[in-house]
């Protein structure tokens, strides 16, 4: 019985280390990166246990056309404060795309914004 418990604990420990390594790899290497411009129309701090900043950017290609929505996540409070300070203004959001994250506790989307630039009108 004692060897079974050691074997089971070893298996659980290997699984946890593997999950931690996988999560680290998914956050370290990004699948893609880019920049999107538009107006932040929704931005909130959401979650029961893991609070993340989730937002919605309305991208208008031509005046009078329907806007396309870009959903994003912000992990850094400093970036979230910059976005909140510029709500309603035309901005460019720089983001990295991380696919394959193991939990939604890290964010609802795969697009993580790391910088914001206010665009002149």
Image: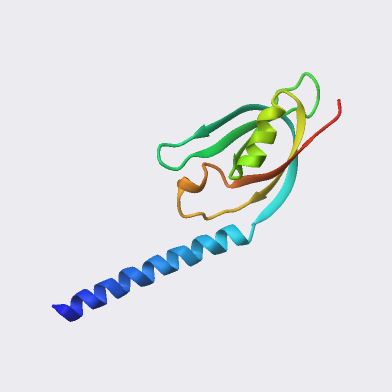
- Considering only vertical position in the picture, is 4 above or below 36? below
Rendering colour mode: rainbow
Q: Is residue 100 left or right of residue 121?
A: left
Which residue in the rendered view is the most extreme toward the left?
1
Q: Is residue 73 left or right of residue 4?
A: right
Which residue in the rendered view is the most extreme toward the right?
120
Which residue in the rendered view is the most extreme toward the bottom?
3
Is residue 38 in sight in this rendering? yes
| Total numbered badges shown on the rendered structure | 0
Q: Position of residue 38 (x, y in %)?
A: 74, 31
Give the quarter of the image for residue 13. Answer: bottom left
- Considering only vertical position in the picture, is 62 above or below 92? above
Q: Is residue 103 left or right of residue 62?
A: left
> What residue sits 86% from the left and 29% below the top?
120
User: Quadrant of the image for the N terminus?
Assistant: bottom left
Front one among 110 and 86: 86
Is residue 68 in sight in this rendering? no
Q: Position of residue 14 (x, y in %)?
A: 37, 72
Q: Position of residue 78 (x, y in %)?
A: 65, 41
- Considering only vertical position in the picture, is 45 above or below 107? above
- Considering only vertical position in the picture, is 114 above or below 41? below
User: Quadrant of the image for the C terminus?
Assistant: top right
Q: Position of residue 106 (x, y in %)?
A: 50, 48
Which residue in the rendered view is the most extreme toward the top?
64
Front one among 102 and 6: 6
Front one among 70 and 119: 119
Give the quarter of the image for residue 8. Answer: bottom left
> What residue sits 49% from the left and 34% below the top?
46
């Amino acid at each position: 019985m004692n060897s079974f418990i050691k074997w089971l604990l070893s298996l659980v420990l290997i699984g946890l280390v593997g999950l931690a390594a996988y999560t680290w790899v998914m956050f370290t290497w990004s699948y893609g990166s880019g920049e999107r411009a538009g107006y932040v129309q929704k931005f909130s701090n959401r979650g029961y246990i893991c609070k993340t900043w989730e937002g919605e950017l309305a991208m208008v290609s031509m005046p009078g056309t329907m806007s396309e929505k870009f959903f994003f996540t912000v992990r850094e409070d400093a970036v979230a404060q910059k976005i909140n300070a510029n709500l309603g203004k035309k901005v460019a959001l720089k983001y990295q795309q991380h696919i394959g994250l193991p939990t939604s506790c890290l964010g609802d989307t795969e697009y993580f914004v790391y910088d914001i630039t206010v665009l002149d009108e």
